[in-house]
Amino acid sequence: MREITFAQALEEALIEEMERDERVITMATQRAPALENKFGDKRVRFTPISEAAFTGIGLGAAGSGFRPVVHWGMVTFSFVAMDQIVNQASKIRYMFGGQADFPVTYRCSTGGGMQVAAQHSQSPYSMFMHLAGLKILLPSMPADAKGLLKSAIRDNNPVVFFECSRLASTTGPVPDGEHTVPIGVADVKRAGRDVTIVGLAYYVREALAVADTLTTEGISVEVLDPRTLVPMDAAAIRASVRKTGRLVVVDEAPATCSAASEIVALVTEDPETFRALRAPVQRVCAAPVPVPFSPPLEQAALPDRARITAAVRRVLEDARRPDPLAR
Amino acid sequence: MALTQAELVEIFRKLVLIREFDLLAVELRTAKRIYGAVHPYVGEEAVAVGVCAALRPTDRITSTHRGHGHCIAKGADVNRMMAELFGRVDGYCKGKGGSMHIADFGIGILGANGIVAGGMPIACGAALAAQLEDAGGVTACFFGDGATGEGEFHETLNIASLWKLPLLFVCENNRYGAGNAVESVRAQTDISLHAPAYGMPGVSVDGNDVLAVRDAASEAVERARRGDGPTLLHCKTFRMLFHAMRDAPQPDMRPTDVVAAWRGRDRDPVTRFEDHLTSRGIATAVEAQRIRDAVKRDLEAAVAFAEASPYPDPHDLLVDMFAE
């Protein structure tokens, strides 16, 4: 299978969906000459730096029959559009009794590790997860990025599509032609026996690297990528944890009220999965600080392979509980 | 275009219907028969009716927290509006929205909005859709004087003008944002002056004169349909009642002499238009009274419709969250 970058996969998805459905339009503060040449400046809009306006314009156009793809740039910039996201987009369908559909996709880059300091290194997906009414996507691989963006554009609800900055230039196999990935379905990226690592975005790749290394010690790690944060595929996560009995969740957002916390809660509040746990669960998350600029500080703030490995060892070493399923 | 006698009488009927609907809403809320907050539109009826008289049924509007009048003017069914105020399943939003969130997408009402200026970007999006559809559709965006303090006001005026969107910005300047006089929160009180800053025409109009509003709106709507872009219509009006009520009206801090003056028969938009019709022989006082009586009967029927409608089933709590 051909290998393309994460960014190329997203570009392909957008072009294919614009070819497929002329009601797909785009809005962004950055010009996209290739798209403009192909689809014209009526459908490919570049906007003033007015995030609140174009976030709501996307919503209003969606409620009037179009399928806008709105790019906030970095998720950072969405915060000046919070009224339109929190008060409008997440509530508009339910509040009006389901009278209309709002098929709008909000794209944004997310995450740290790029030495752009606190305001441009945020991973605030849990803020959006908290609002009932938005679907939240966070792919880790180019094929998932393409397949999920296509599904997002075809979905009849507001979708926030997070694109991890550190993944933009990573490559991976992407099928030729039509390729979609269903929203709300997790993917086991590597099957294993002893520990489940649930990773998000960049940390799926890091978890896979850790899993490779630990194989040499005879430790078998399962790596699961939720891919969708809302609706979360709780069944897949619980099934994996019931199999391994141990869970490490890795994400670059701080732990408090995070996606990682939500995943841990979904695991521990399910009686059958709770009983299958053989060790306390571990979260490997960012330090509770604004992401600092200087590389040694930034590295200290974000999860890394050493911390993931240490967490895996902790859940393996905690042998206080025998294997409940072995009885 | 001159209005026919039937059209003029219908304008009067809509003014009366809005007036009586909101007086009844206040009465029902005082009696604790309906729930939540009520923001009466009493005194501002000529703005909604005048603007919507310039629109086609397929045109779209966005509304505000004080939105009952906009919905009625655009043609909403008072039975379903009333059922929504009663929190019943036959309400426009199946009881999920209430007074501040009435919508009827089927007739172009893209929703009332509890956030000041919150509907403005959405209206802009509807106008973008109309521009792309290229079928001559127009969107009217209602907002109050308070909205001009929000960033969304300035952002949408700029983009709408830049993109020449078929949009009518309708500022209902009722002189007070809740209890705060416009001059206490704005450095410059002529709201139409924002228009030239964003490269569009700004028109100030007597917002209590329904025909003046209709004429100004018609001109703006024609301009929008021609593809010449948006207009800011500044309608000077007055809220005859309090800002809002829950169990009881919020205290009205406005000077009593000012309020009394705006309640005079010659300024009240409903009696003023009634006198216009009767003095010109377009309708007799008896005919006007007949319309008032018919409106009251319609509203009694609306209350009966609402009360006959069941409450939503708690089992349906999660219904309508996501589209298939």
Image: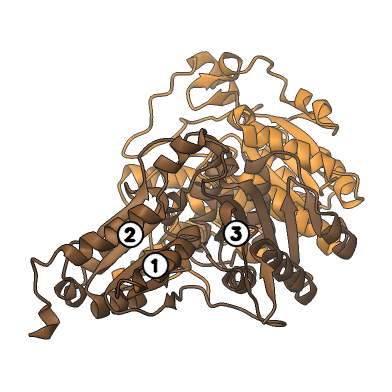
Chain colours: A brown, B orange
Residues at discs 3 and 1 both on one chain: no
Quarter of the image where one finds residue A70: bottom right
Quarter of the image where one finds residue A53: top right
CB within 8 Å, label 3 to label 2: no
Looking at the picture, which amino acid does disc 3 mark?
Answer: Ala
Looking at the picture, which amino acid does disc 1 mark?
Answer: Thr
CB within 8 Å, label 2 to label 1: yes
Residues at discs 3 and 2 both on one chain: no
Please name the residue that numbered disc 2 is placed on: A309
Looking at the picture, which amino acid does disc 2 mark?
Answer: Thr
Apparent side of residue A225 relative to residue A103 in the rendered image (left or right): left
**Residue at image point 32% right, 76% down:** A220
Residues at discs 2 and 1 both on one chain: yes
Q: Residues within 10 Å of mark 2 (few under 14, many from 20)?
A: some
How far is disc 3 from disc 1 in space, using C-alphas?
Answer: 66 Å
Mark 3 or 2: in front is: 2
Please name the residue that numbered disc 1 is placed on: A213
For the question of whether residue B280 can be seen, the reply is no
